[in-house]
Image (cartoon, rainbow, N blue to C red):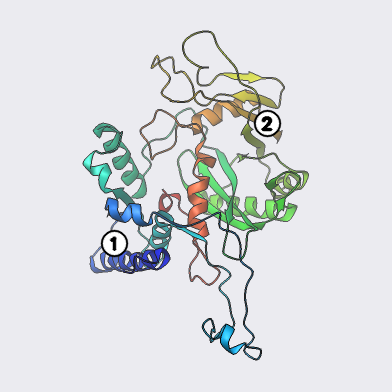
Amino acid sequence: MDKSNEFTFIESLLRSIESKIERIAKVADKKPDVILLLLTEEVYELCHIVGDYHRRLRKPRIIDANQLDLFKDFDTLQLSPRVDTDKLVSRNLRSALKKIAMNPVYGVPIQIIRENTLLGKETQNLATRSWNLCTGLYYKTGDLPWILDAMDAKSCFLGISFYHKKTAYRDYVFSSMAHLFSNDFNSVVLRGDPVPFDSVLKAPVLDREAAQKIVEKALSEYFNSRESYPERLVIHKTSRYTDAEIEGFEGALSNKGMAYDLVSLTKAPLRLIRWGQYPMPRAAAYEFSDRDAYLYTKGFIPDLQTYPGSHIPSPFWVHKARGDSSIDTICSEILMLTKLNWNTADFCCGVPITVSFARNVGDVFKEFREQDQFEPSRFFRFYM
């Protein structure tokens, strides 16, 4: 493998690993439920991230074979005038490996393990490492490690997020994705269509058609699994809703006869301070209208008599743009959804499961190109 060119090196490494995955998936009498991949520290440090995401864009240079400067263009002459405008400016080894595992030819989730993790050279203790590994493997085999008794199984949650794909020649592809979740339901990941970036709101936004399409697609997935629609749908979004998005979501739900709530979770401009040694307790909420609340998803935990964190926690601004439920119910559900990350031994996470893995999922989506022969997997276990 050529280590002088990091992109050449990672491509060679991926081909080598894929050949091993193919052999494992095809040689055995029964396809494995999950494949463990151990990365040495040398390989990890060398190519877990290659390229420069912040690299400036280049204008596509297409050579006209009829207008060549013999001395200037001879060394750069390409037999084909086409330019690969979909080439990424940076690569993520983890995401590229996840994409390989999604190939229907193999279709086996992978668990990536660093050498230092097994050798105990990280800050986590043995019990934590064992818990994380075992629960992760259990979920990737298709089982649910735990569900919540207090959560209504007839309610379905849909997280809407966006990812930014930057190539050598393009820097405008903001695409939508959705994470469909129910309490006793193997969650599903859906890839939406490219969406524009609103320079005024400084955020990507869905138009009415795109918003309606992604909800209809999610409900179709739910119906195919349950042969019925949920009685209630809650949509979580990490930016405020535009009028077009509200119209699109309501258009998809208008003829389904179900209750719904459109909820946004954004950074709160307010910080609350309590008297004492520790910060605000987890689940503390300041409801300042029937549609708005500041909610602490991380903080002091009375049962543990400590705050298991290193930074002062900050609240979310929870806003109900439309909906049938009270802001108190919405906040309670967000807190419950922070306990459903099956990839950690932590008591809870700071972000609900509906949107907490948006970055990881988006990084995997970036690896897909228009000419690929298969689509990203629907199942969330391939992205963990």
Q: Is residue 199 left or right of residue 153?
A: right
Task: Between label 2 and label 1, give the one nearer the viewer.
Answer: 2
The residue drawn where x is 34% and y is 43% is 136
Q: Toward which corner of the image does residue 231 lie, by quadrant?
A: top right
The residue drawn where x is 49% and y is 44% is 357
Q: CA distance from mark 2 to mark 1?
A: 46 Å
Instruction: Please give the residue where the numbered disc 1 appears in the rendered image.
Output: 31
In the displayed structure, 373 sits above or below 381; it is below
* Position of residue 202 measured from the top left corner of the image (x, y, whole percent): 70, 45
* Position of residue 128 measured from the top left corner of the image (x, y, whole percent): 30, 33
Instruction: Please give the residue where the numbered disc 2 appears in the rendered image.
Output: 319
Q: Nearer the viewer, residue 162 or 136?
A: 162
The residue drawn where x is 51% and y is 57% is 365
Q: Is residue 324 visible to the viewer in this orientation of the structure? A: no
- Split into 4 quadrants, where in the image is the N terminus? bottom left
Q: Is residue 113 left or right of residue 272?
A: left
Q: Under tag 1, what secondary structure?
A: loop
Q: Earlier in the sequence, mark 2 or mark 1?
A: 1
Q: Nearer the viewer, residue 153 or 369?
A: 369
* Position of residue 271 measured from the top left corner of the image (x, y, whole percent): 61, 21
